[in-house]
Image: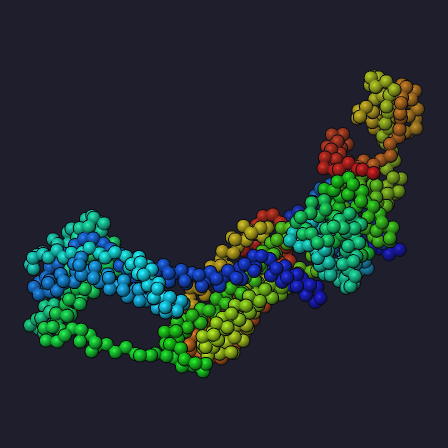
Amino acid sequence: MSDAIVLRQINKTFGSKRAVIDLDLTVPEGSLCGFLGPNGAGKTTTIRMIMSIIFPNDGKIEVLGRKSAIESKDRIGYLPEERGLYRKMRVGSFLAYVARIKGVKSPTLSHTIKEWLDRVGLADCYKRKCEELSKGMQQKIQFLSTIIHDPDLIILDEPFSGLDPINMRLLRDLISEMHQAGKTVIFSTHVMQQAELLCDRIMMIDRGYKVLDASLDEIRAQFDPRTIIVEPIDPGADLSSLTSLAGVREAVQSNGAHELTLEPDADPAETIRRIVGSLPVRRVELRRPTLEDVFIELATSGDESAKSREDLRHALRSDAEAPHA
Amino acid sequence: MRRIARIAQREFVSTITTKGFLIGVLIVPVMAVGAIAAINLLWNDEAPAVTGTVSLIDRSGVVAKEIQSRINPVAMAIDRDAEVDRKVRELADKAGEVLGDEMAGAAAAALRGEAEKLVGPASDIRIDLLDADADEEEAKEPLRIGTVQDGGQLALVVIDENAVQRDVDGRYGSYSWFARARLDDRVQSQLRWKVHHSIVDLRIRATGQDPDEVREMVTASARQAKTVTASGEVSSTADEVLSLLLPMGFMMLLWVSAFTGGQYLLTTTIEEKSSRVIEVLLSAVSPVQLMTGKIIGQMGVGLLILMIYSGLSIAALITFSLMGFIEPVDLAYLAIFFFIAFFFIASMMAAIGSAVNDMREAQSLMTPVMLVMIIPMLLWMPIARDPNSTFAVVLSIVPPISPFAMVVRLASSEPVPFWQIAISIVVGVVSVYIMVRLAAKVFRIGVLMYGKPPNFVTLLRWVKQA
């Protein structure tokens, strides 16, 4: 299978700030790829470079087999992070306009637009002005403007931000559908849970550097579980003894349960046996690492302090919407 | 190309279908006509009524009586009634044109009331005759204190000894006039005319002739004064007015059409940028394509305005059979210079619009642009009066003023040498090419820049960077 996007040694600086550093990236055709990283990591800059809206200082970009996105713009659907509509334009004409400047020549375009509006529950909005719509409705129109010309490569910059749970699910379904239809989808997000639910491939960048680029399965295999969740039968039980067990580095209480972080060389199976032997438990679980854990692991590698990890975890969650399956 | 056309089409349609555009296009001529009409209506050349005295030192000893007979409340009331009668006739003539003569006759009573209102009450001014050898400086003193409204001394007239009789050298003298500060200029000229006539009439009578007879003798105004053109004849007054108005009309046409398009371009660019539509557009077209499409779209808007207004103007000229004043080739030149002016202004506006975040920031960059663009407004008069002066020739070659200066010259009375038109067009086209190139560089960087509003130095850096 060929690659939809290839980036080789991309560098981009704004003034003295290095936004993207020596970035290598490969997105295989047909994959559904999450592009992760905290705010300011360089996601939007990278996407804009892929779109040839801005240009790297050096490095090579290949999009859909062409030297730049300019040559294949019509086959790409792009939802910018900064979204906009023509406030005074009617929804139908706006979508038609976007489709036409992306080279759609079909005479049945208005029919296609109506079908899509129906699909996202905005069938009655065809003739309404964009400014009359609510923010969530506008966002759906923006998404439609991204895919209305039936692109092969879809790039979405923070598509979930600002959506309510129902629309979030709708959007997730639409993305999955595109993926199943064989299209390549990339979306950036700083909400790790979204990526975890949808993607088959994850790229992570942090402060301009790539920290991860692998399939979800590879990631799960690579980062073995290091956290055990313990919930005693008696909520008031004294658990101070757990921290002194061999192999346990620290214990943190959260939501009535206790998360035990293991020493790097500890054997999880052996530790669980010891926990069960020391007190009666309602639940003991070896937790699979979430992307959040992986990201924190990668972003703070070399920095062992628990405080900096917790700060980062907090930062990641503070502006992230909870996942709604 | 198809995409540029799409963008241009959208830009054009979405601009001309706004209420603001329709109102604007209609309002500008209505306001121009309204302003002229309002000035006519409000302009009153009747002297307001004042009360007071005019001091008179008559060194000749013969004029005082004559002046006293003209400047006194009774004489001035008679003058005022005559003025009312004249006004009534004038109004009746106007009403007759509109209503028909019989109805105008019926309306005469109403017209008198209207005329009296227009003329106002008569002034109550008397002459305060001083001694013939009174001191001039002393007599002036009361003028220095108090105000016109106090009803005291309004002015001082000093008649020369030889005002009516030639002196030993055979020369006539005249009079001196000293008025109080802020005495209405119309009252002053009314009074001075009376002094003037008093002296002149006495001189004529001294030679044994009748002043009214002499006045008739020295008057011979042209029965008709007309300018003959291919399409007919117009009065010379109209010709004089036209020879100034036509250049101004040409320039205003160019100015309004080029600027309206440019202004809209600025607004839509800022709107696209601040609503972030710009990135959606840039995922489909390149910045240069976007700018090109937008400029072409607004060119359509400018052309539409140019066609509407020049169509109306030509219709008006044909109605009054004044079409002969315009050479058809001038209209072609007007179109050429429209393109030069428009592309220059529009690319500048696109660059400014792309660089700023909102209209407020645009204002600071617009100020120097506007200062330059005001120049043709200030200079059309001297250029139209003297279209082949060195000053006019230079202005018509230096962009960005050249298109405006050149259409003023083209529409004025003296023909412009063809080589100057050619140079102006070539220089204009080159300046447009450079401006569009610079604007494209600024636009490419500007459209994705948010945050700190740029100044001209920043824009220059972007030009170098691109």
Measuring 12% from the left and 64% from the top, which residue is drawn there? B66
Q: Position of residue A161 (x, y in %)?
A: 73, 43
Q: Is residue B206 visible?
A: yes
Measuring 19% from the left and 48% from the top, which residue is drawn there? B145
Measuring 70% from the left and 57% from the top, which residue is drawn there? A93
Q: Is residue B390 visible?
A: no
Side of A307 where B419 appears, left or right: left
In this view, the residue farthest toward the bottom is B230
Of the 4 image quadrants, the one containing the C terminus of chain B is bottom right
> Which residue occupies the foreground of this view, B420 or B268?
B268
Of the 4 image quadrants, the one containing the N terminus of chain B is bottom right
Q: Position of residue B234 (x, y in %)?
A: 40, 77
- Residue B6 lies in quadrant: bottom right
Q: Is residue B235 above or below residue B39?
A: below
Side of A16 where B228 appears, left or right: left
- Residue B93 lies in quadrant: bottom left
The colour scheme applied to this rendered structure is rainbow
Side of B436 where A128 appears, left or right: right
Measuring 55% from the left and 73% from the top, which residue is drawn there? B336
> Which residue occupies the foreground of this view, B40 or A9?
B40
- Residue A264 lies in quadrant: top right
> Which residue occupies the foreground of this view, B29 or B388?
B29
Q: Position of residue A32 (x, y in %)?
A: 84, 48
Q: Position of residue B273 (x, y in %)?
A: 63, 53
Numbered-mark total: 0
